[in-house]
């Protein structure tokens, strides 16, 4: 079995972060491992509190995994502090000859508006983790924060892909879930564009979709799929998970990571 590692923050209500990553890895057929960067207190209504772990704790977790287990892909999610980012970059560079794929989801703001990346850490993230990434998967608000201009059209999404590529990233998937009239994503591999056209699904329950997508892509890359094939399969998986999402709590509910498994086992 291929093995994938997520480096991210936890989500106490289980819909996003480390918990979503592990579910997505498992649902997509790889063994899941984790390095926790922060502990959050959150529920379906929002993020209430974040406690970042000490950089030494993050480094020791990464070291423990790589010194013992072959890692076939890494997904990086919420890393909110400069020291954490620098620690992850230094640690992964130490093992870069053992790293075929890194998928970076540059998580900056939660759906409820909580800043998950400190404002002064944005440049550190770009300068230190972008060059390590096989693929980055920002949504439109994240791209606008990084590049400093509004993005409302597919053409602007393509321009954003090219601009992000120039910042040292091998490939970019700009997610269009915040577009007004369509749910299209644009993939740019440095030379060619691919547009993934999915239907808009009318549900409030989309907690953790970004975490889930990036983790599914990492899982599919770990299994040997090409970048295009990995993104395509992962988009189909996330669309299914959103279609069968469910309500828990009083706010934005989670997607159904294991719908196919539950359906096949008649659970």
Image (spheres, grey):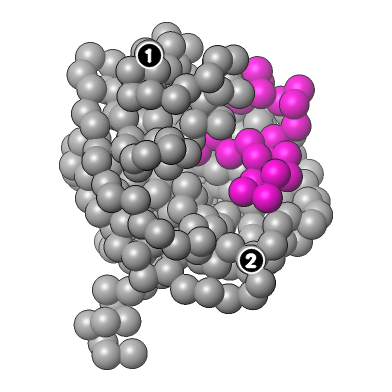
Q: Foreground: 148 or 117? A: 148
Residue 169's x, y, as percent? 42, 19
The boundaries of the magenta stretch are 101-125
Residue of label 1: 159
Residue of label 2: 251
Q: Is residue 135 magenta?
A: no
Residue drawn 51% across and 61% down?
Answer: 204
Residue drawn 22% across and 44% down?
Answer: 232
Residue drawn 25% across and 54% down?
Answer: 236
Q: Splitting the image into 4 quarters, where does residue 195 fall?
A: top left
Q: Nearer the viewer, mark 2 or mark 1?
A: 2
Up/down of 11 relative to 248, above or below: above
Residue 8's x, y, as percent? 59, 48
Q: Is residue 107 magenta?
A: yes
Disc 1: CA contacts within 10 A as few (<14), some (14-19) or many (>=20): some
Residue 15's x, y, as percent? 55, 64
Quadrant housing the N terminus: bottom left
Residue farthest to the bottom, as pictured: 266
Up/down of 161 relative to 228, above or below: above
């Amino acid at each position: 079995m291929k093995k994938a590692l997520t480096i991210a923050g936890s989500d106490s209500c289980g819909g996003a972060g480390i918990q979503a990553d592990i579910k997505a890895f498992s649902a997509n057929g790889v063994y899941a491992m984790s390095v926790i960067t922060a502990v959050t207190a959150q529920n379906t209504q929002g993020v209430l509190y974040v406690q970042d772990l000490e950089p030494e704790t993050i480094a020791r977790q990464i070291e423990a995994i790589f010194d013992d287990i072959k890692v076939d892909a890494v997904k990086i999610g919420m890393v909110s502090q400069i020291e954490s980012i620098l620690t992850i970059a230094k640690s992964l560079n130490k093992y870069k000859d053992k790293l075929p794929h890194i998928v970076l989801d540059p998580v900056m703001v939660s759906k409820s508006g909580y800043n998950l990346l400190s404002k002064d850490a944005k440049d550190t993230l770009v300068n230190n983790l972008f060059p390590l990434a096989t693929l980055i998967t920002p949504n439109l608000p994240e791209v606008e924060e990084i590049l400093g201009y509004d993005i409302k059209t597919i053409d602007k999404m393509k321009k954003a892909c090219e601009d992000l590529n120039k910042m040292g990233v091998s490939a970019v998937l700009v997610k269009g879930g915040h577009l007004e009239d369509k749910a299209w994503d644009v993939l740019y591999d440095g030379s060619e564009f691919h547009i993934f056209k999915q239907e808009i699904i009318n549900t409030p329950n989309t907690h953790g979709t970004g975490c889930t997508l990036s983790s599914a892509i990492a899982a599919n890359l770990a299994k040997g799929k090409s970048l295009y094939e990995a993104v395509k399969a992962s988009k189909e998986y996330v669309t299914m998970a959103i279609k069968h999402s469910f309500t828990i709590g009083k706010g934005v509910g989670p997607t159904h990571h294991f719908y196919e498994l539950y359906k096949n086992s008649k659970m």
